[in-house]
Amino acid sequence: MDAAAIPVPPRLRERLTVPVLAFGGILMAVMQTVVVPLLPDLPRLTGASPGAVSWMVTATLLAGAVLTPVLGRAGDMYGKRRVLLIALALMTVGSVLCALTSDIRVLIAARALQGAAAAVVPLSISILRDELPPHRTHSAVALMSSTVGVGAALGLPLAALIVQYANWHVMFWATSALGALGLALAWWAVRESPVRAPGRFDALGTLGLAAGLAGLLLGVSQGGQWGWAGARVVGLFAGAVVVLGLWAWQQLRTASPLVDLRLAVGRRVGLPHVAAFFTGFAFYANSLVTAQLVQAPVATGYGLGLSIVATGLCMLPSGVIMLLFSPVSARISAARGPRVTLAAGGVVLALGYAVRIADSTDLWVVLVGAAVVSTGTTLAYSALPTLILRAVPPGATASANGVNVLMRTIGQAVSSAAVAAVLVHHTTRVGGAEVPTLSGYQLAFAMAGTVALVATAVALTVPSDPAPQGAGAAVPTVAAKGV
């Protein structure tokens, strides 16, 4: 039975489209973060080694990175709503499997299924472009972009509370119920877009991209454990370079490529992709470092000794700020253009890290600094998809935004590795255990702030949009001429 069989008044459908899609984006981020509080206890709960348990994060990262551009392209070709429902269904099935088992092999496979949810945001942004009137697109896209931070801020305390007061499987049953609700709402309220990009699906390009990204991200995520100069990591990086080089050669020669590289490397699309990489790097360092810093023992001289639950609650204000500030970022983009919003986001991110460097020992300063970083992230993340929407034809919206999300994901993976490397090399012994020093955290903040300024510099080189600013009515028209 199709959703069309259940009549939905057009005005009600239009009103529900944005909140339903935003709920899906929040679910995606929640699914990615809920496992974090479990990681220290999972070796005991599953009987697996810490190295095997770490794959519950790595598998989701790898699957999401590979599937985001693939599902984006599939959405452009076969229907964005259809592929969105598939992504939400895979996410929900993965959660159910996690709830039913303690076998680490099944858990890792299930977390890989949940990685498909990474495509929800680019697919939803594409649906918003196709379905909403132009004057509502800016604010809707900004809200959709903010759901990444909102979901991450909600997922950690939710998981921590459930893990502390209930069996850990209950957490996955809760996310399964939320996933089923999101799937049902999307099936009922979201209309299929008539915009299509005809062509033949590039299976060879999909395999090449999957192999290349798997090698690259596996090397980045495991380099700290395996050794950056070790044969496995060097081999993965070398193999990734070769495979991605061959993939690019194949993409340029196929009639219907998975990723239109000629479009992707143009300044109006390529530079936002580069900015997405640096922004993802800068944003993710805040989440990584803040959680560790506030949980550090008081004996360190800077740590607050907070519990996992209290740490999660400290992340909540940042998520609320991203939600509330998204309309402001949309207004800035409408008035000044998205590249100005992106550049401003980088500056605000850097200011937030300056606050963190100045003082990271008082809780209220930590919260203020994290809130400033979240504000900058909201500006940047809301501007990136708007830049892409203005630069690509309607038939390439989902795939182009999928590549942009992929670049953010790669930036986050590199940030994780870089922050870990910095903290490992700046440690001290407290109570018989090695813990990072305050100077190590400050160096990580300085690194992230510098990267944010690099993102600002890249944003300022993005060509000005020739379309009139404001309502954005010219955006679909200009894009349509490129089809």
Image (cartoon, rainbow, N blue to C red):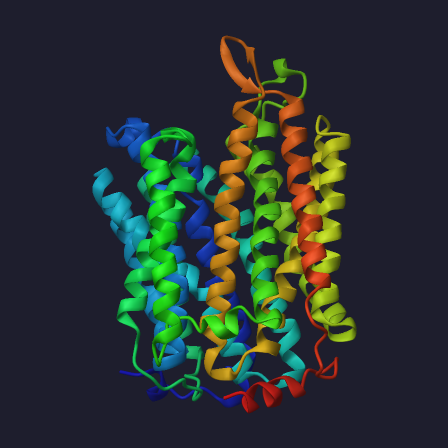
Residue 233 location (% of width, % of height): 36, 37
* Residue that appears at 76% across and 44% down: 351
Q: Specify the quadrant of the image occupied by residue 194.
A: bottom left
> As displayed, is residue 447 above or below residue 75?
above
- From the viewer's side, name the closer residue of 414 and 32: 414
Residue 457 location (% of width, % of height): 72, 56
Residue 356 location (% of width, % of height): 72, 35
> As displayed, is residue 48 above or below residue 34?
above
Q: Is residue 160 left or right of residue 251?
A: right
* Residue that appears at 33% across and 84% down: 199
The N terminus: image quadrant: bottom left
Residue 193 location (% of width, % of height): 44, 85
Q: Is residue 194 left or right of residue 474?
A: left
Q: Specify the quadrant of the image occupied by residue 342.
A: bottom right
**Residue found at the far top of this picture:** 432
Q: Specify the quadrant of the image occupied by residue 48.
A: top left
Q: Is residue 232 left or right of residue 9?
A: left
Residue 63 visible at all? no
* Residue that appears at 74% across and 84% down: 468
- From the viewer's side, name the closer residue of 233 and 59: 233
Residue 465 visible at all? yes
- From the viewer's side, name the closer residue of 433 and 307: 433
* Residue that appears at 67% across and 23% down: 439
